[in-house]
Image (cartoon, helix red, strand yellow):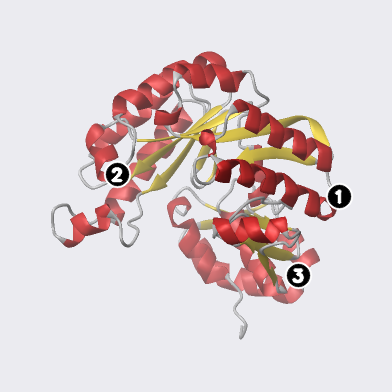
Amino acid sequence: MKKKDEMILALAKEMQLRKSEINDVVETIYFGGGTPSVLTSEEINFLIQEVYSNFKVVENPEITLEANPDDLSNDRIIELSKSPINRLSIGIQSFFEEDLQLMNRAHNAEEAKKSLAEATKYFDNISIDLIYGIPGLTNEMWKQNIETALSFGIPHISSYALTVEPKTALKKLIQTGKISEPKDEVASAHFQILVDTLQENGFIHYELSNFGKENYFSKNNSAYWLGKKYLGIGPSAHSYDGISRSWNIANNSIYLKEIQEEKLPSEVEILSQEDRYNEYIMTGLRTIWGVSLNRIENEFGIKFLDYLLRQAAKFIADDLLSIANNVLKTTRKGKFLADGIASDLFMLGDD
């Protein structure tokens, strides 16, 4: 408990130390990473108050809390609904027991449904995460997962292909042959089912992994994809100011010690012109806003624009990219391959 109190005070202290870094108005506040749902409502209110004390904040900011279904008891949801939190991001992952066990999740399928049934009574703006490409997850089961989510009237869904991290139970099961490796063609089929089903239900596919009803796009994530500045507070948090990127140390004890000594426990990387161009290509191609050729020319110069058009030519010929109104976007066929295509458009030091 003592460590938690120390951490909350350190987060407030870091905000004070860094208040000069943001001159713009804060539009979104996001409690994420780890399990912010261990915070009490008093602690959440205290941290939000600290944001208001140190920065200028818009009139109705989007304030999101990430939580897992097992953290969201009825009492907890009611308590959160009385706080300034106005958006929940719930890590559902799947409504099937076998998938949740495979991914080593703490909650079960019943808790997933129960948390949504309760959360939707008190929160209008809810996002859930769903994972596809799981070994053993058939197309039919995947459709059921999506249909279950839709039955709760959720206005935002983030969905990702299963990735197998080293040193996890899942990795061990694959290595010992107990389950098969996730297959790209399965993930690709699931992705197409997801896109079609959600679009039929009035969702806009505004970013590769994100689908939202009108007026329910994540403002927090959209700011990142549109290259806006952001400030990350706490261990492991990342920040971006348009020119440089910085990240705080991951170690809690060192973080606490440095903040208490009024030092910022972070590393900074100044982004080169190539880095900034590559980042814009990567984020732009993942979104409905695409890559503005005017912006490429104005911000980076004709050399970058010529290079981009040369590199993009083969993807345009293969109907994976298209240009309309001077904006480069992925086609329906190219969407699932956006990250791979982007890496072929990157400018590397010797290009």
At x 33%, y 40%, the residue is 105
- Graded by Cα atoms within 10 Å as few (under 14), some (14 to 19) or many (20 or more), the crowding at tag 1 reads few
Q: Is residue 322 visible?
A: no
Q: Position of residue 11 (x, y in %)?
A: 68, 47
Viewer-proximal residue, 200 or 13? 13
Q: What is the number of the mark on residue 219? A: none
Q: Is residue 148 above or below residue 246?
A: above
For label 3, the residue is 300
For label 2, the residue is 104
Label 1 to label 2, Cα distance in Å? 42 Å
Whichever of callouts 1 and 2 sits on the residue coming sooner in the sequence is 1
Q: Is residue 77 above or below residue 25?
A: above
Residue at the far front: name it.
2
Q: Secondary structure at mark 3?
A: helix
For label 1, the residue is 23
At x 42%, y 22%, the residue is 115
Whichever of callouts 2 and 3 sits on the residue coming sooner in the sequence is 2
